[in-house]
Amino acid sequence: MTTVAAALAAARAKLPASEARLLLGQVMRQGPAWLIAHDDELLDEDTLLAFAALVARRAGGEPVAYLLGYREFFGRRFAVSPAVLIPRPETELLVELAKARVGAGALCVPGNPLARREAESRVCRDRGQVTPSILDLGTGSGCIAITLALELPLSRVTAVDSSGAALQVAAGNAQALGASLRLLRGDWLSGLAGECFDLIVSNPPYVAAADAHLAQGDLRHEPRQALVGGADGLDAIRNIVAAASSHLAPGGSLMIEHGHDQADAVRGLMGDAGFEDIKAHADLAGILRVTAGGLPSAGGAPADSH
């Protein structure tokens, strides 16, 4: 019979050791530390066959996250499937910026019922003033919206996606993680007539249709509609920016993740749409990854889009 160590050694002819450990751990329902401590454990035939099947699929290019059925994001485990984009570490920047924009969400409390109608369209700048409303467009797995709902538990979060299959994944993640939010099926902002938010965030499709990377690596297996943003990659961003101002409260902010070479274009689109204090923010790799802009407040002062 084959041991854990022998099975992993054989798999390393096709995969990195770290991936092989994750896949064997998935089959055995054990973590990498257990595999190391029990490397002389004998594996039965069913385990070996299941492991071999996963190794073959990964060697064929299927993303590890889809094979495992999950990906970690902001310290939480999110279920994923081929219906949704795999969460990326760089997208955590968008969450961090959104948290900073909203402020100390845990200290914000809802206004009283009589004041709520007037107050709900304002950002919670002062402790105890208002419950902020947040909209996530193109939510996919729900990793952004759910994380914000959990990190800012008194915020009101709405998440929109055009894919029913993606919304099913997001709903499952919300339930598993205990997040309270509203999930809606729709095409960007088109189904939100009359609704207004303090903060709109999005990680939309922003890859150009002819980008060679679409035929490489994990991108080959991810949903094309979640990746491709038209000929120049900016179609979805144009749509969002053009419509966002009519769905933002005075002083509200828009934050969009984009490609490594799109910051200037996104800045221009936001400026043309009337946004102010527009800033591009770099991820941990130094790449300008998120651009944020704000609308003037009711008093005319520009919003702080930090």
Image (spheres, helix red, strand yellow):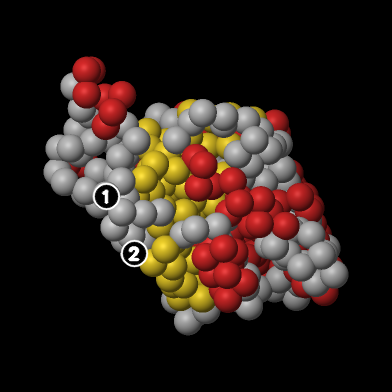
Q: Position of residue 135 (x, y in %)?
A: 47, 41
Please tell me which residue is depicted at 62% across the width and 72% down the height of the picture.
265
Q: Is residue 119 above or below residue 219?
A: above
**Neighbour class for label 2 at 10 Å: few (<14), some, many (≥20)?**
many
Does residue 62 appear anywhere in the picture? no
Structural distance between the alpha carbons of marks 1 and 2: 19 Å
Say left or right for 190 vs 248: right
Residue in front for this viewpoint, 163 or 129: 129
Residue in front for this viewpoint, 39 or 24: 24
Determine which residue is flagged by label 2.
306
Q: Position of residue 17 (x, y in %)?
A: 62, 72
Please tell me which residue is depicted at 30% across the width and 40% down the height of the picture.
122
Q: Where is residue 233 in the image (x, y as percent from the top left)?
A: 73, 64
Residue in front for this viewpoint, 61 or 269: 269
Q: Position of residue 29 (x, y in %)?
A: 55, 45
Q: Which of marks 1 and 2 is in front?
A: 1
* Amino acid type for the residue under numbered disc 1: Gly
Q: Is residue 13 above or below residue 242?
A: below
Snapshot quadrant of residue 132:
top left
Does residue 229 appear anywhere in the picture? yes
Say left or right for 249 vs 300: right
Residue located farthest toward the top when viewing the structure as drawn: 113
Say left or right for 73 vs 239: left
**Which numbered disc flags the more N-terminal residue, 1 or 2?**
1
Asked whether the beta carbons under mark 1 and mark 2 sit within 8 Å of each other, the answer is no
Element marked by disc 1: loop
Please tell me the numbered disc located at residue 299. 1
